[in-house]
Image (tube, helix red, strand yellow):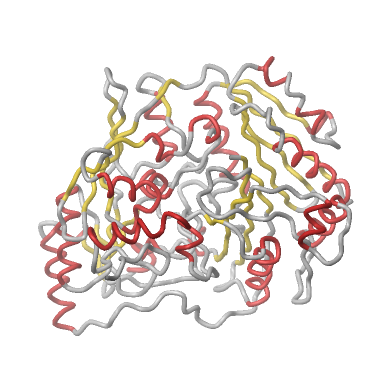
Amino acid sequence: MLLCSVTRTLALTTLLSSNGLFASATPQNNDENALLQTCLTDSVGGDATRAQFSSGENFSTEYVKPYNRQYPYTPFAVMYPKNAEEVGEMVKCASENNRKVQARSGGHDYVSKCIGGADGAAVIDLKNLDQFTVDGDTHIATIGPANGLKAVVEGLHNNGKRMIPHGTSATVGIGGHTTVGGFGPAPRRDGLTLDSLRPVEVVLANGTVVRASSSTHPGLFWAMRGAGQSFGIATSFEFDTKLQPPNVVTYQYNITSSDSAVLAESLQAWQALIADPALPRDLYTFVILQGPTLLVRGTFLGTRAAFDALRLHDRVRNIAAAATTVSDASWLDTYTATFRFTDNLLTDAFFAAHTAAVPATTVSDASWLDTYTATFRFTDNLLTDAFFAAHTAAVPAANDSLAALITHLRAGSPGPAARWWVLIDATAFPHRGALCYFQLYAASQEARIGEEGMRFADGAVEALQAGRYGVYAGYPDAGLEEPQKKYWAGNLARLQEIKGVVDPRDVFSTGHGVKPARG
């Protein structure tokens, strides 16, 4: 899996009316609220510091902290358990009082699912579940959901120089990352994070704690690897680990030009590179378009001699010698540099996106006030003249088409009448067979993106892919119709059947989650 990322910043002030994507929770009367508050407080032994309620002071700023101000929901409570048993008690309290439950691990979330996706949910923040051990004989790692990816890298390195595949944002929590997929620099060689998962400890909708594996609760185990948020709260993960690669080469090529045609030529060359069936699985590559610069960056899990033999510098056109950086480093140093790159790529005034770009260190006090929308679509086709002939009325040359797209993305304002050339045709989920994925972001420091900005992002996605695409559930998209079909496609029916067994009342519920099958 290769990353093709095109980014575009918007700073717009027009406000949207309230988005109706998620229905508000059913209002509760004061007696019911009091009973629930007492029950939740009892679940933590009366420790008021670990049971915060919407009636308290500074509830939103201190405890809710919505990751995206576009969706500023207010939970009924934010709870801080210390173990799986407390999580179970909290879930029982909420379920018995007809409240929806939402777990929060790292808190990276584009549509505020991690604070319930609607007002009134009981949010269970897992920040205290940060256990981390590695068995010295089996090298199996037991990791709590609160650990960020930086902690995972360092912890595995300090326990025998081990590794698992995962993403590149230091502060993304391993809990949500694993249960939705877990993309990173080595998926073509090592798979996703969830592919290394062994048994997982899960709190179910009735409050019971179970251990799900391929032999015990196999249906639940299957569902937790890709749609976990809809089935339970993972409180502990076991991972098969492997030795870190002995050699890692990092590379970065900057192509800067005010001429969109120059950037289009380079992007076309990169596109040809990733389509090469002989491309080794040890190579990871992505591109980012920002302003006048096309950035080609990635890693190679091998020796410098083997990397040089790939001749990437020659295959990606218009690279000046001064704009080339290639270096050898250890696995730990490579990830440390990657975390630093993604931390510095975007500022608090910009926008956050784990994989291609992430927020400033540990999501600072200012960054959670930002507003943005993002999309993450899979594709298996490349841009060719024949492709344009099949998808557009006018058939420009491929480079001309890319140049038109790049010019549009770099424009000062998209404008409501802007036209898009089709860039890629997306495939349906599952995504393992996809050639690359495409990301588009729009951001603002205003309270909402604005109608023009939303049209820019939504129109781009639809025009580029014409309704045929798979979507990564880790990047939930508020503009999707029938989102479950986009996220899980052919797996959805089986997921709905399992949901009907383990969570028939939809306790773990958002507008983007799996719904139970109805008889």
Which residue is at the front of the view, 60 or 339?
339
Q: Quadrant of residue 237?
A: top left
Return the residue found at the far front. Answer: 519
Which residue is at the front of the view, 12 or 101?
101
Q: Quadrant of the C terminus?
A: bottom left
Q: Quadrant of the N terminus?
A: top right
Is residue 510 found left or right of 215 in the rendered image? right
Task: Please tell me which residue is depicted at 27% across the width and 41% down the height of the picture.
Answer: 200
x%, y% of residue 314? 82, 28
x%, y% of residue 76? 27, 72
Task: Please tell me which residue is depicted at 45% across the width and 54% down the height of the picture.
Answer: 108
Task: Please tell me which residue is depicted at 38% across the width and 63% down the height of the picture.
Answer: 513
Q: Quadrant of residue 461?
A: bottom right
x%, y% of residue 138? 28, 21
Q: Is residue 494 above or below residue 305?
A: below
Is residue 411 found left or right of 156 in the rendered image? right
Q: Is residue 282 above or below residue 516?
A: above
Q: Quadrant of residue 72?
A: bottom left
Q: Is residue 95 above or below residue 128?
A: below
x%, y% of residue 34? 15, 77
- How many badges with numbers are in the image? 0
Task: Please tell me which residue is depicted at 40% across the width and 46% down the height of the picture.
Answer: 173
